[in-house]
Image (tube, helix red, strand yellow):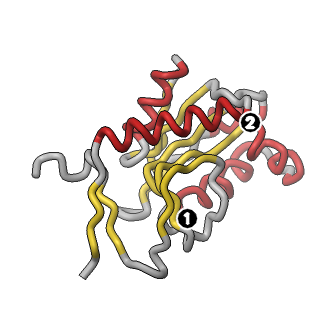
């Protein structure tokens, strides 16, 4: 049986504040905040409101289906030196963030050396929770960590079971 860990809206707000603080300490400020549907929408909205930065959404869902949305527009903005923060609730398996890192260069800019500069400079990743056993090892910002390989758990964010 999987152990469920419940988070509150207060937890999420506090964690978004921590991410904002960490970005400020890095001297990095997003021009665009991208919320990954579904889990990244609430934290992306909070961060975009704080920075008064436009928010966009990107649909990438490997848990519910194999639906992915390509964004040539965001790729081109990254190349044009816009700072883009991609936000999700959890870096669980790594499939979502790895997919973005593979999809964007193939969609709009073929040179790997240029993309190596863009990741971490123009484009950064923020997640509330980072799973140590994920195949995506280094989100730029995260607050909470778990290791699902050692202890199986299901993290329940407030938007997932608000009706209970």
Which of the marked residues, 2 or 1, is nearer the chain's N terminus?
1
Of all residues, the one furthest to the top in this rendering is: 52
Q: Which mark is residue 134?
A: none
Q: Secondary structure at mark 1?
A: loop
Give the camera-side residue of 108 and 57: 57
Residue at position x 39%, y 36% from top? 13
Residue at position x 42%, y 38% from top? 14
Number of numbered discs present? 2
Residue at position x 54%, y 64% from top? 95
Q: For mark 1, what is the residue?
A: 94
Q: Is residue 22 visible?
A: yes
Of all residues, the one furthest to the right in this rendering is: 113
Residue 113 x, y percent position in the rendering: 89, 51
Residue at position x 27%, y 57% from top? 6
Residue 91 x, y percent position in the rendering: 51, 59
Name the side, left or right, on which 107 lies relative to 91: right
Give the camera-side residue of 7 and 77: 7
Q: For mark 2, what is the residue?
A: 122
Q: Mark 2 near mark 1, Cβ–Cβ under 8 Å?
A: no
Name the side, left or right, on which 82 lies relative to 126: right
Of all residues, the one furthest to the left in this rendering is: 164
Could you give the CA–CA distance between mark 2 and mark 1, rounded to whole angstroms?
20 Å
Q: Is residue 92 above or below residue 90?
A: below
Name the side, left or right, on which 9 lies relative to 105: left
Q: Is residue 77 visible?
A: no
Name the side, left or right, on which 91 lies relative to 125: left
Residue 3 x, y percent position in the rendering: 28, 73
* Quadrant (top left, top right, bottom left, bottom right) of the N terminus: bottom left
Circle 1 Cα neighbour tier, 10 Å, few/some/many (<14 / 14–19 / ≥20): some
Residue 119 x, y percent position in the rendering: 75, 46
Circle 2 Cα neighbour tier, 10 Å, few/some/many (<14 / 14–19 / ≥20): many
Q: Secondary structure at mark 2?
A: loop
């Amino acid at each position: 049986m999987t152990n469920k860990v419940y988070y509150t809206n207060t937890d999420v707000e506090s964690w978004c504040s921590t991410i904002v603080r960490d970005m400020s300490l890095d001297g990095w400020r997003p021009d665009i905040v991208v919320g990954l549907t579904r889990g990244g929408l609430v934290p992306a909205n909070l961060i975009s409101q704080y920075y008064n930065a436009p928010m966009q959404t990107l649909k990438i869902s490997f848990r519910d289906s194999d639906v992915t949305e390509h964004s040539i527009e965001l790729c081109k903005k990254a190349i044009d030196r816009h700072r883009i923060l991609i936000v999700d609730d959890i870096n669980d398996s790594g499939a979502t963030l790895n997919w973005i890192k593979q999809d964007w260069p193939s969609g709009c800019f073929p040179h790997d050396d240029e993309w190596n500069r863009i990741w971490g400079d123009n484009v950064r990743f923020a997640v509330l929770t980072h799973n140590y056993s994920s195949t995506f090892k280094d989100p730029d910002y995260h607050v909470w960590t778990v290791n699902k390989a050692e202890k199986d758990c299901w993290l329940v964010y407030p938007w997932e079971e608000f009706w209970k």
